[in-house]
Each structure stands twice: as structure tokens, then as C-alpha cells.
Image (tube, rainbow, N blue to C red):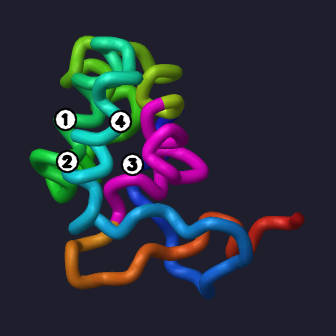
Amino acid sequence: MKEIFTGTAGTPGSGSAPPAPAALTAKVRTLAPSMTRSMQRVAEAVAADPAGCSAHTVTGLAELTGTSEATVVRTARLLGYPGYRDCASRSPDSPPSSSRAGRPP
């Protein structure tokens, strides 16, 4: 799993949109009680430094947080993103992109 923990540009798709990066910290606080400790570590790392986390591969973020690659992906999905590439991909001023852009339905 060498893909970078960033999203791809595209047109918004249908369905629920992932939370904007500015809302990520609030979402982490709301969902934290329902998360495992491992998931909390990933979510807190992403919320604390989205730009820093976006520079990591899923493996790198897992190593940074002392978790597994699967935990990184599960956490991203719990936070409302289709996968880890979409999670911390945008600056707070940018709208979230659709992960379905360029993918078959």
C-alpha cells in the first residue's frame, strides 16, 4: 500500500460528502467515544495536523500512530471519507473532493 494519504481532484458526486477539514476536529471529538484507542490515535493525528498526515502513505500514518493500515482506512471511513486518500487531502479553505470521480460506479 504505497498510495499517498491524499485525495484526488474531481467533481462532486452524489451521496453524503466527507466532512470539510475545518469540521474534522469537531467530528473527531464527537465520534471519539465510539472509537477504539487505535482509531482515536489515527483520528487525533489527522485532526491535529491534516497537512502533515497528507504527506504520509497509509503505511507511514499507521507507523506514526502505532496502528495498522486497516485501522487507518477504517478510521477514515468512520470520519465520513471513502478511504484514507480522501481523508486529510484538502486545506481548510478547500472544498472536499469526490472520491468517486474518475471511478466506475
17 horizontally vs 71: left or right: right
* Label 4 residue SS: helix
* Label 1 residue SS: helix
Q: Position of residue 60 (x, y in %)?
A: 29, 30
Label 2 is placed on what type of residue? Ala
Residue that badge 2 annotates: 47
Mark earlier in primary sequence (4, 2): 4
Q: Mark 2 Cα within 10 Å, few/some/many (few <14, many 20+)?
A: many
Q: Are marks 2 and 1 in contact (CB under 8 Å)?
A: yes
Label 3 is placed on what type of residue? Phe
Image quadrant where one finds the C terminus: bottom right
Label 4 is placed on what type of residue? Leu
Nearest-to-viewer mark from 4 and 1: 4
102 horizontally vs 43: left or right: right
Nearest-to-viewer mark from 3 and 4: 4
* Label 2 residue SS: helix
Residue that badge 3 annotates: 5
Q: Are marks 4 and 1 in contact (CB under 8 Å)?
A: no
Residue that badge 1 annotates: 44
Residue drawn at x 23%, y 44% is 46
Q: Mark 4 Cα within 10 Å, few/some/many (few <14, many 20+)?
A: few
Gap in angstroms between the C-alphas marked 2 and 3: 13 Å
Closer to the camera, 88 or 63?
A: 88
